Amino acid sequence: MLDIRGLRSGYRNYEVLQDIDLTVAEGEIVCLLGHNGAGKSTLLKAIFGLLPVTGGEVNVAGRDMTHARAFDKVAMGLRFVPQEGNVFPNLPVEDNLRLGAVKGAGGPAAVARNIREVYGMFPILQERRDQPARVLSGGERQMLAVSIALMTEPKVLLLDEPSAGLAPIIVAQLFERVRLLRDQMGKTVLLVEQNVTEALKISNRTCILEEGRVVYTGPSTEKDAIVRKLWRLD
Amino acid sequence: MIQTLIIGLGLAGYYALVAVGFALIFATLRIFHVAHGTVFITAGYVFWYMHRIHGISLAISATAAIAAAAALGLAIDRFLYLPIMRRGGGMFSVFIASLGIVLVFDAIYLVLTSGVIAVARTTSMELWTVGGAAIRKFDLGIMGLVALTYFLLYLWLHRTRTGLEVRGLTDNEQLAAAVGMNVDQTRNAIFLVASAMAGLAGVLTAYDGGITSDSGNRTLFIAVVAVILGGVRNILLGSITGSLALGIITAYAGFFYPEWVTFCIFAIMIILILFRPKGLFG
Ligand SMILES: Nc1ncnc2c1ncn2[C@@H]1O[C@H](COP(=O)(O)OP(=O)(O)O)[C@@H](O)[C@H]1O
Ligand SMILES: [Mg+2]
């Protein structure tokens, strides 16, 4: 579903990513681990079209989308939930959701249906529909951020550290939702995480990034190997 | 003194039309668009040229002038600001480019008009006498027009999809791109709407007191102070309150101490900057 080959990208005068190869099959959760500054966020932004790609290719559902802009990628069924600033803080929850749908194919009826669906999944958001997003708790904010991305019924979700700063019980709830997105809705997810234990529980495969390179790929059941690799114990 | 108050409210109307567009552009795109004053005065001159010089009807001249303003504002963004930003230019570069536009157009208009005031009106103003005070119907008309414009702007921002996008862009620019918004299209809409409102103000000013080649800058500076005064947290409310305050202040100052009007405005600005150095536009 998501096929990345030899991807190079980064910031002005600073190429962070070096020849990244990564595939995520349809209906799979791939977890992307790595220390701070490894280039995980950069990789998601490059895949999504928010950073210039200087080499390699990004294929989505078999189509070359390497140089497509973010709004074309949204139209193709790809969505990105940034690590920070992932809601519109001063707008009501429901306007946040509507903004999530600006690139949606359907009309107002489809938007209303998707909002209802999101409220079904996260009832707390319905209770807070008229409140500005800034008053939400950390967990609610992440739920809103994911919901904004769900508004266009995407096939592939790129999630950047959704559990950052959340209490363990909230993390478990949130990850349970992400698991349901795959198991019940067939979504494909590339999940960047720091919370290794929880991320391994829900993901099919794991990929470790170090200094802009992929240094490990394997099934998420290989917890020992992954942890050893992550802490450079090998 | 009601007479002066009404004049002040009329002035506030002009400021409010210019200020709200400036605030909209600043809040959404962080561009300090001083050429907004050029857009304002261009509409004034187009209107004056068509209506006063060529005797074309009020409605057609005004419509053409507002359209010209919208087109000029859009062109400045498309052919100047956007290319600068695409090439990695920061907001300071964009500001200097904007200033460049102001100076170029100032020079052109000064040459074309030889510095003579351009009054587009061909008839005298109708007055209304209320309790001994002579009130110009025109000032009341401006107030009505501004109220209507603000109402339409409110509907645009809160009831349309483009308006929703504009609010999203104001609140979180990065996420606006991430949700798949075509930010370039949204900014076109912002420049069109903001410039059309400046154009309306330019037409009204040219019709009312007339314009000289420096009227654009003067009005723009007052509008900027109004925006600083009212803030851009709430674009509509901030612009209107700031403009009302400055309109009334300039009207009374102009009545009692006309030579101190400019002093007043800039004294207000300096005091504001002194006390809110960071939250200038907050
Ligand atoms: N906006 C930016 N401009 C320049 N360099 C950046 C920017 N954002 C991140 N970097 C650099 O890119 C590298 C990778 O960062 P990032 O992708 O955010 O890492 P991670 O998400 O894995 O913690 C780091 O060295 C970081 O300093
Ligand atoms: Mg990161």
Image (cartoon, helix red, strand yellow):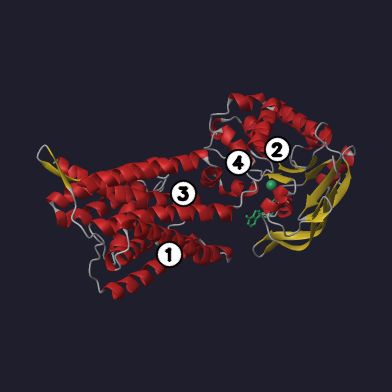
Mark 1, residue position: B98
Q: Does any atom of ligand 2 lie closer than 8 Å to the CB of label 2? A: no
Q: Could you tell me how far apart the alpha carbons at marks 1 and 3 are, in whole angstroms?
A: 17 Å
Does residue B19 appear left or right of residue A200 in this picture?
A: left
Which one is closest to the eye, mark 3 or mark 4? Answer: 4
Q: Position of residue A150 (x, y in %)?
A: 70, 38
User: What amino acid is labelled 3 in the image?
Assistant: Ala
Q: Which quarter of the rendering shows the C terminus of chain B? A: top left
Q: Could you tell me how far apart the alpha carbons at marks 3 and 4 are, in whole angstroms?
A: 18 Å
Image-quadrant location for residue A154: top right
Mark 3, residue position: B27
Which one is closest to the eye, mark 4 or mark 1? Answer: 4
| Chain under callout 2 | A
Mark 4, residue position: A99
Mark 2, residue position: A150
User: Is residue B221 something that shows in the picture?
Assistant: no
Q: How many numbered markers are drawn?
A: 4
Evaluate whether label 4 is on the same chain as label 1. no
